[in-house]
Image: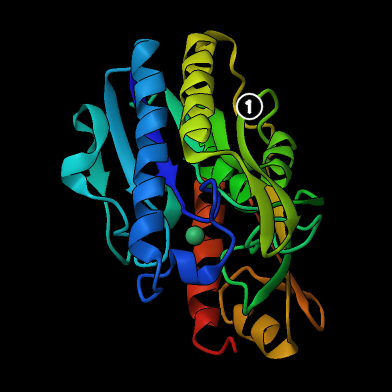
């Protein structure tokens, strides 16, 4: 049994500030260790329930936050920049389950620690088939395309609730409760890891009943930007339709292609986001 793990960083217990999860930050080394241990907690839980192969796709910042030699169970490590499928690079039909580890909430919606949707300087809100979506919902498009269920998310309470809209029945390992975008009440890291291990094991044990992401196709992504220049730039891409001054939409019957177009928009608008 193979598990694909997309790991971010903002959802780690104790993390509440950009400084803690940027390589230039003064406390980064401490928090990257906590992240590594949460990723390993998910791996160990899955392994206890019978999973044997693991691929960890590092999806945060420069995408090289983990220590390859310290990953549990000889997990493979996909790291580094310019990945065409970004947070979901490496997933294919050979996998049995997807985990989202240390995820965070969407830019729109209830306050969630370090909330954003791909680019906090460019994107104000994303809707998927009309429903507000965070990275978990957007990334679930790729899981749907490869017909692999998303069965675990770890992070704060708001992030967990947002995943449920697109991944019904997903197990949530809630390691902190958000107070604001820059404050959260976290479990002790040891307890957070226990919760993650237990949730991962439960998720793998009940894999047979896990549904695929509930996203009707063709799917529509609606993206509202923080200014009109960004929306204009997104329309440089074929198939992107301007909805109003700040908003564009894109529609596709292939969920992986839809995700790739979205990633292209993210990368394109990064150049002018301030
Ligand atoms: Zn991140």
Q: Is residue 60 above or below residue 247?
A: above
Q: Position of residue 232 (x, y in %)?
A: 67, 86
User: What kind of element bears circle 1?
Assistant: loop
Question: Left or right: 242 with respect to 114?
Answer: right
Whether 209 is drawn above or below 93: the answer is above
Q: Does 231 sit above or below residue 96?
A: below
Q: Which of the pair 67/20 is nearer the observer?
A: 20
The residue drawn where x is 56% and y is 64% is 118
Observer able to see residue 93: no
Q: Residue 215 appears at what percent x and percent y?
A: 69, 37
Is residue 41 at all visible to an observer of this figure?
Answer: yes
The C terminus is located in which quarter? bottom right
- The residue wearing badge 1 is 170
For the residue with label 1, is its CB less than 8 Å from the closest atom of ligand 1? no
Viewer-nearest residue: 232 or 57: 57
Image: 208 above or below 39: above
Is residue 162 toward the left or the right of residue 61 in the image?
Answer: right
Residue at 68%, 60% in the rendered image:
183
Q: Farthest left residue?
A: 69
Instruction: Give the residue displayed 56% in from the left and 75% down from the top.
Output: 237
The N terminus: image quadrant: top left
Q: Residue at x 47, y 65 (%)?
A: 20
Residue 187 position, x and y percent, is 59, 39
Taking 109 as reference, is 266 left or right?
left
């Amino acid at each position: 049994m193979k598990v694909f793990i997309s790991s971010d960083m903002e959802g780690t217990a104790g993390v509440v500030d950009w400084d803690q999860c940027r390589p230039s930050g003064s406390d980064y080394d401490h928090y990257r260790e906590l992240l590594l241990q949460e990723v390993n907690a998910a791996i160990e839980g899955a392994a206890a329930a019978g999973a044997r192969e693991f691929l960890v796709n590092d999806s945060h910042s420069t995408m090289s936050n983990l220590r390859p030699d310290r990953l549990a169970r000889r997990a493979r490590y996909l790291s580094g920049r310019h990945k065409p499928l970004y947070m979901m690079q490496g997933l294919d039909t050979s996998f049995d389950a997807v985990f989202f580890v240390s995820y965070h909430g969407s830019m729109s919606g209830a306050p969630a620690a370090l909330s954003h949707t791909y680019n906090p300087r460019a994107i104000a809100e994303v809707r998927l088939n009309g429903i507000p979506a965070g990275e978990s919902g957007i990334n679930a498009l790729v899981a749907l395309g490869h017909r692999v269920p998303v069965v675990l998310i770890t992070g704060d309470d708001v992030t967990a609730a947002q995943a449920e809209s697109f991944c019904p029945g997903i197990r949530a390992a809630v390691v902190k409760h958000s107070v604001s975008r820059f404050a959260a009440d976290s479990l002790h890291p040891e307890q957070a890891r226990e919760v993650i291990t237990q949730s991962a094991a439960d998720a793998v044990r009940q894999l047979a009943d896990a549904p695929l992401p509930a996203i009707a196709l063709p799917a529509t992504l609606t993206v509202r930007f923080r200014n009109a220049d960004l929306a204009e730039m997104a329309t440089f891409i074929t198939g992107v339709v301007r909805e109003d001054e700040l908003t564009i939409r894109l529609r596709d019957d292939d969920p992986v292609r839809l995700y790739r177009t979205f990633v292209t928009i993210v990368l394109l608008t990064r150049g002018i986001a301030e």
